[in-house]
Image (cartoon, rainbow, N blue to C red):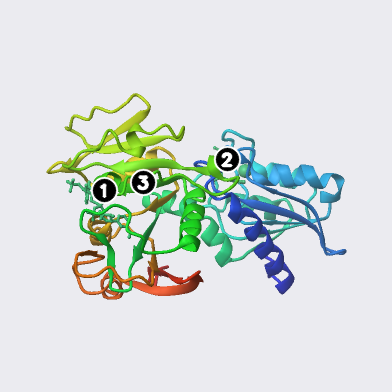
Amino acid sequence: MSAATPEDLRWLDAAARAAEPFLGTTADNPTVAAFVVDPSAGILVGRAVTARGGRPHAEPLALESAGARARGATLYVTLEPCHHWGRTPPCVDAVVRAGIARVVIGMPDPDPRTRGESIRRLHASGIEVAVIDHAPSVRLNEGHTARHALGRPFVTAKLAVSADGMIGRRDVAKVAITGEDARRWTHLQRAMSNAVLVGGATAEIDDPQLTVRLPGLERRTPLRVILAGNRGIDKRSNLIGGFSGHRVAVIVESGREMAVPASVEVVRVPGEDGRPDLAETLRALHAKGIARLLVEPGATLAEALLADDLVDRFELIEGTVTVGPDGVPATGKGTMDERLAAAGFGEIDRQRLGEDLLRTFEKVGKA
Ligand SMILES: NC(=O)C1=CN([C@@H]2O[C@H](COP(=O)(O)OP(=O)(O)OC[C@H]3O[C@@H](n4cnc5c(N)ncnc54)[C@H](OP(=O)(O)O)[C@@H]3O)[C@@H](O)[C@H]2O)C=CC1
Ligand SMILES: Nc1c(N[C@@H]2O[C@H](COP(=O)(O)O)[C@@H](O)[C@H]2O)[nH]c(=O)[nH]c1=O
Ligand SMILES: [Zn+2]
């Protein structure tokens, strides 16, 4: 195994940055970037990201774009090349065939069909290999990793909270808590997810569209999912009765009747007292190939997910407005900071979104 140099890290960082905007476009396949670099000249001679829909994979596309210049070059790839014959031939074969001299890998592939086999294969073929525990690659692959390690999508919950700790006003739709930059950021997160989920109460009270309304990115709207409980679903809502042309699914407890228009998919999962079980809900979404799930919960769904330890990242957007005494509190268990700390989360990042503050929380001491 060869050691990685600072130059290697720069190329791998650049590869990860190139792949990030395509998160959410590769269906059930991880979004991988492959850079082919001429090491003596220090120039990029070929590059690609996993194609829309997940195939072809990144490596054959990057090698094709490099052509003859791939011989003797270094390949930077954010995930170990695949070893199996799936819907495409093994990428590792293409790498060997192209005459690549050195491969720098962002992380091993957790898919059991590969899981280190390609690293061994590359070694055995006389190719120098460096495997880096590369944080941007690990982050890029977090949906893929969750699918294999946990049998569920990577779950990001996003909640907007007012200066006085409220998420809305009782029975009032769409209370403005955060501003335009936060709205755009949220739509970008939707675009980079495979599905976006809300609870039935939010679907009815807020009547959201859950689309990506950013110029040029409208078609990146992911699968929109309503978690229906006893309240049922409102057939006149935007999600059920609207004509956006984007897919909608409703998750319901197995035994329940649910009459919806033919355009809406009904997914039945086991549950209790009229509510689908949350772990079963995530398993069902995993079975549909969802790797990255964005949840836009109200207080009830946020609490239920935290209580069941089903959140991987919590994005808290703090607004500057004050809602007042008729507001709906974000949590019934102290402040959001206290609730997140009790669930084992710590703040890992913060950034301004216009007037608002985005605070990112992840599990402390996560492996
Ligand atoms: N500021 C923000 O970021 C956001 C604010 N909101 C606000 O939050 C309020 C609505 O949120 P809230 O009332 O908390 O409800 P939520 O929409 O967050 O979640 C509860 C809904 O999900 C259903 N559900 C189905 N299965 C489950 C389960 N296993 N566990 C928990 N819930 C389940 C519930 O069913 P049942 O019918 O059986 O109760 C209920 O309809 C509105 O005022 C809205 O404006 C909403 C989203 C974001
Ligand atoms: N996207 C991607 C990889 N994805 C790997 O391939 C698996 C899917 O295989 P298939 O069904 O044949 O497309 C997936 O689980 C993951 O292990 N591999 C790569 O070499 N490069 C890529 O760009
Ligand atoms: Zn491959």
| Mark 1 crowdedness (10 Å alpha carbons): few <14, some 14-19, many ≥20 | some
Front-most of 191 and 214?
A: 214
Give the distance between the C-alpha atoms of the residues marked 2 and 3, in whole angstroms.
Answer: 29 Å
Quadrant in which residue 317 is drawn? bottom left
Would residue 117 appear left or right of 195 to someone viewing this image? right
Where disc 1 sits, the SS reads helix
CB of mark 2 near ligand 2 (< 8 Å): yes
- What amino acid is found at the position of numbered circle 3 in the picture? Pro
**Image spot of residue 272 (x, y percent):** 14, 44
User: Could one spot residue 98 in this view of the protein?
Assistant: no
Front-most of 208 and 27?
A: 208
User: Could one spot residue 366 in this view of the protein?
Assistant: yes
Q: For mark 1, what is the residue?
A: 205
CB of mark 3 near ligand 1 (< 8 Å): yes
Give the distance between the C-alpha atoms of the residues marked 1 and 2, in whole angstroms.
Answer: 36 Å
Name the residue: 26% across, 71% down: 339
- Which of the marked residues, 2 or 3, is nearer the chain's N terminus? 2
CB of mark 1 near ligand 1 (< 8 Å): yes
Q: For mark 3, what is the residue?
A: 208
- What amino acid is found at the position of numbered circle 2 in the picture? Gly
Q: For mark 2, what is the residue?
A: 54
Front-most of 299 and 366?
A: 299
